[in-house]
Image: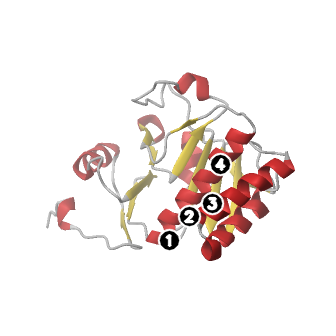
Amino acid sequence: MVTLQLRQLNVPPGQRIVLTDVNWSKFEEILQELGDKRRNRVAYAQNQLEIRMPLPEHEFDKEIIGDMVKILLEELEIERECYGSTTFKRRDMAAGIEPDNCFYIQNYRSMIGKRRLDLTVDPPPDLAIEIDVTSKTQLSAYEALGVTELWQFSQGSLKINVLQAGEYVESSFSPTFPNFPIIEGVSQFVQMSLTEGSSAALRAFRKWVRSQA
């Protein structure tokens, strides 16, 4: 039997490695070996671990959509705590995930000042964002952790998933921003950023939010 260390594996941008039959202890060991200062992202559910390296396209979309959410929250004067790509995991659920971005909104108050998270005590994020460029988001991990709302952005289109009875159901609107045509708005201004730049697109998005409010 050949044993490889993770530092021997090279995951090129846009590629992924899937490891099967990974128990919780091994998952914890792998996270420790990967460390905190890394660009790759992991997803773990049903004893399967995916390690993926994002492309620049992925990082751009992640940032601009995260900025749009922050603009919405600011303009609507809704409190929030942003936890970015924090590793969320629960041993009793055998699940772990690192979203591209995530927000505590309804539960923001309980997260103020938190620098270490324990999902057996702390709530999961209220809203998570995933950018699907070369692979699809593992919904089962998010379902197990109980993330209420999950946005998936792929090929210029936004899909909103809402947790109902432990499973995601696609929704035509965002429960967090029910009075806004989020799917159309996000897609429109991401597309605008490709021709006019992200700064101009975000300024236009802010004006759009104000016109809709």
Q: Earlier in the sequence, mark 3 or mark 1?
A: 1
Q: Position of residue 46 (x, y in %)?
A: 46, 52
Local crowd at mark 4 within 10 Å, few (<14), some, or many (≥20)? Answer: some
Dividing the picture into quadrants, the one containing residue 61 is: bottom right
- Assign a secondary structure to mark 4: helix
Residue closest to the eye, 163 or 63: 63
Q: Earlier in the sequence, mark 2 or mark 4?
A: 2
Quadrant housing the C terminus: top right
Residue closest to the eye, 135 or 192: 192
- Assign a secondary structure to mark 3: strand
Residue closest to the eye, 199 or 189: 199
Q: To which residue does mark 4 refer?
A: 69
Dividing the picture into quadrants, the one containing residue 158 is: bottom right
Above/below status of 15 relative to 206: below
Residue for point 70% across, 61% down = 159
| Disc 2 from disc 3: Cα separation | 11 Å
Q: Earlier in the sequence, mark 3 or mark 4?
A: 4
Q: To which residue does mark 1 refer?
A: 57
- Kindly report which numbered mark, 2 or 3, lies closer to the viewer in this rendering: 2
Q: Earlier in the sequence, mark 1 or mark 4?
A: 1
Q: To which residue does mark 2 refer?
A: 61
| Disc 3 from disc 4: Cα separation | 14 Å
- Kindly report which numbered mark, 3 or 1, lies closer to the viewer in this rendering: 1
**Amino acid type shown at disc 1:** Glu
Q: To which residue does mark 3 refer?
A: 152
Residue closest to the eye, 74 or 88: 74
| Disc 2 from disc 4: Cα separation | 12 Å
Q: Earlier in the sequence, mark 2 or mark 3?
A: 2
Local crowd at mark 2 within 10 Å, few (<14), some, or many (≥20)? Answer: many
